[in-house]
Each structure stands twice: as structure tokens, then as C-alpha cells.
Image (tube, rainbow, N blue to C red):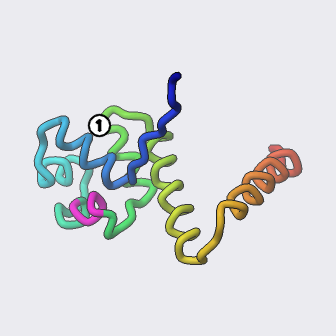
């Protein structure tokens, strides 16, 4: 029987893996995407959050889907907020229903 196992990583962990697979130093990547080395290190350790522009630059640099990196970023945001508010998974179900509602109500 096949199991549907989802690999759970944070944006920072994903970026570290991409950098290490490319055998690049923090300094090399930070220089290429135009940020400070210490900031990239903090992003990789999940101590700081990347901006949307930084995520775009990293996607371009590593030649990966920007959408996938944004998905990692947003899922981190949801998880942090759920923990902070001590919310349960039913909250996510309500949010999912609201997303569908907003999509139909505010179609562009």
C-alpha cells in the first residue's frame, strides 16, 4: 500500500538545502541575490522572514518555482499564527471555506 507522505520543511530549510545542493556558501548566495550574509543565515535558520522580493530573487537564482517558495513562505506564516493563537485545525477548515467564498464573491 502506497503512503501519501508530505515532506514538511520550512522556507528556510528549503533554501538551505538548495544552497547546499549547489555547493555554495552563504556569502556567495547572499551576494548574488543582493542581501547581507547574516540575513540569509537568519532566514535559513527561520529567525527572520524573507520578503516577497527576496523570495523572487532566490527562485530566479536557484532556478526553482517562485510559486513553490511562496507556498513554503505562506505555510510557515499560517503555522506560526496557528501556534501563536493556539488555534486548532478546524480554524484552517473555516479559512479554506472562506477562500472559496472570496474567490466566487470577488472574481476579477
- Residue reaching furthest bottom? 85
**39, 32: nearer the viewer:** 39
Locate residue 106, reporting x and y percent. Answer: 84, 50
Name the element at disc 1. helix
**2, 88: nearer the viewer:** 2
Q: Which residue is at a point 17% across and 35% down the rendered structure image?
A: 22
**Figure disc tally:** 1
Q: Which residue is at a point 30% across and 61% down the rendered structure image?
A: 43
Q: Quadrant of the C terminus?
A: top right
Locate residue 44, reporting x and y percent. Answer: 27, 58
Q: Is residue 22 above or below residue 26?
A: above
Q: Is residue 103 left or right of residue 66?
A: right
Identify the image quadrant of residue 86: bottom right
- Residue reaching furthest right? 105
- Residue reaching furthest top? 1
Locate residue 105, reporting x and y percent. Answer: 88, 50
In the image, residue 43 lies in the stretch drawn in magenta: yes
Dominant secondary structure (helix, strand or loop) of the stretch shown in magenta: helix
Q: Give the range drawn in magenta.
A: 41-45
Locate residue 29, reporting x and y percent. Answer: 19, 48
- Residue reaching furthest front? 1
Q: Is residue 78 left or right of residue 66?
A: right
Q: In this view, does 5 lie above or below 30?
A: above
Identify the image quadrant of residue 30: bottom left
Q: In this view, does 56 lie above or below 3?
A: below
Q: In this view, does 104 lie to the left or right of 3?
A: right
Q: Is residue 30 above or below residue 84?
A: above
In the image, residue 3 lies in the stretch drawn in magenta: no
Q: Which residue is at a point 24% across and 49% down the rendered structure image?
A: 16
- Tell me the residue that label 1 is attached to: 62
10 Å neighbourhood of mark 1: few (<14), some, or many (≥20)?
some
Q: Which residue is at a point 48% across and 39% down the rendered structure image?
A: 6
Amino acid at each position: 500500500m502506497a503512503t501519501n507522505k508530505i515532506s514538511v520543511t520550512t522556507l528556510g530549510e528549503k533554501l538551505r538545502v538548495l544552497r547546499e545542493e549547489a555547493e555554495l556558501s552563504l556569502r556567495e548566495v547572499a551576494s548574488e541575490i543582493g542581501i547581507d550574509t547574516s540575513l540569509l543565515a537568519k532566514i535559513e535558520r527561520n529567525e527572520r522572514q524573507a520578503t516577497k522580493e527576496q523570495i523572487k530573487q532566490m527562485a530566479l537564482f536557484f532556478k526553482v518555482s517562485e510559486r513553490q517558495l511562496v507556498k513554503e513562505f505562506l505555510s510557515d506564516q499560517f503555522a506560526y499564527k496557528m501556534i501563536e493563537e493556539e488555534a486548532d485545525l478546524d480554524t484552517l477548515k473555516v479559512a479554506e471555506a472562506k477562500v472559496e467564498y472570496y474567490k466566487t464573491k470577488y472574481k476579477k
